[in-house]
Image (cartoon, helix red, strand yellow):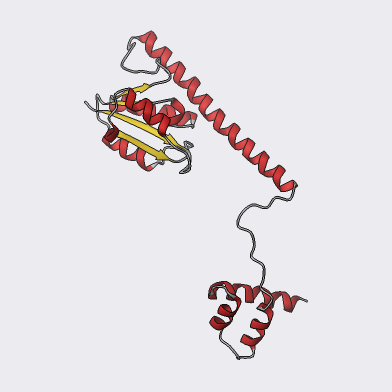
Amino acid sequence: MATYGYARVSTTDQHADRQLTALLASGVERKSIFIDRKSGKDFSRPAWKRLRRRLRKGDLLVVQSIDRLGRSYGEVQDEWRWITKTLGAEVQVLDMPLLDTRKNKNLLGTFIADLVLQVLAYCAQFEREAILTRQRQGIAEAKKRGVRFGRPRRKMPPEFAEAVEMVRCGEISGREAAQLCGMSYSTFREWMRKFRADQNGK
């Protein structure tokens, strides 16, 4: 029987140090810890899929908290049931001692654990939805203030119109014109199409 740990952070900018410390302190070996840097909205995560393939009956999976496992109410419960019922492995949630399938295997203990799991999984999904709502509201308010998102648009160089005319007259090639304007050939072609369309529309 093997013991595995699972840690997850939502983005590549975040660190899993706190989770790693907790997992190592619980007795999980570093080589047996799988880490994902991806949202918990579903279980389409590379490290989780590798861990899932490694798990066997009687193994123990350790996570720091239920929201590290996932933030989808239904999917967390489905994965939990697959691990504990279908596969026959054990799960330990470090910050919630009631969620340790090795203990209290009687009917009451199982009922309490299932109930706690449902509540925590619901809270994890509710928190994720609240975060997304706040993000959408923040973006909407920022747009009202004139904040622009995404890559800023590059300004057309002053020599662009002259370069387009020189290309039209056959004095220089498109690649030479792009070099003259300090941009890639593909960008120059795209801008030239838009420039000509604007000129024809006037």
Q: Is residue 20 shown above or below 141?
A: above
Which residue ends up furthest to the right in the rendered image?
202
Q: Position of residue 143 (x, y in %)?
A: 71, 48
Give the residue at x 55% y 33%: 128
Q: Is residue 84 left or right of residue 133?
A: left
Q: Position of residue 13 (x, y in %)?
A: 48, 43
Give the residue at x 24% y 24%: 58
Give the residue at x 34% y 39%: 49
Towards the viewer: 105 or 170:
170
Give the residue at x 41% y 33%: 17
Quadrant of the image containing the N terminus: top left
Quadrant of the image containing the C terminus: bottom right
Q: Position of residue 148 (x, y in %)?
A: 68, 53
Q: Is residue 59 shown above or below 43?
A: above
Q: Is residue 104 left or right of residue 13?
A: left
Q: Is residue 103 visible?
A: yes
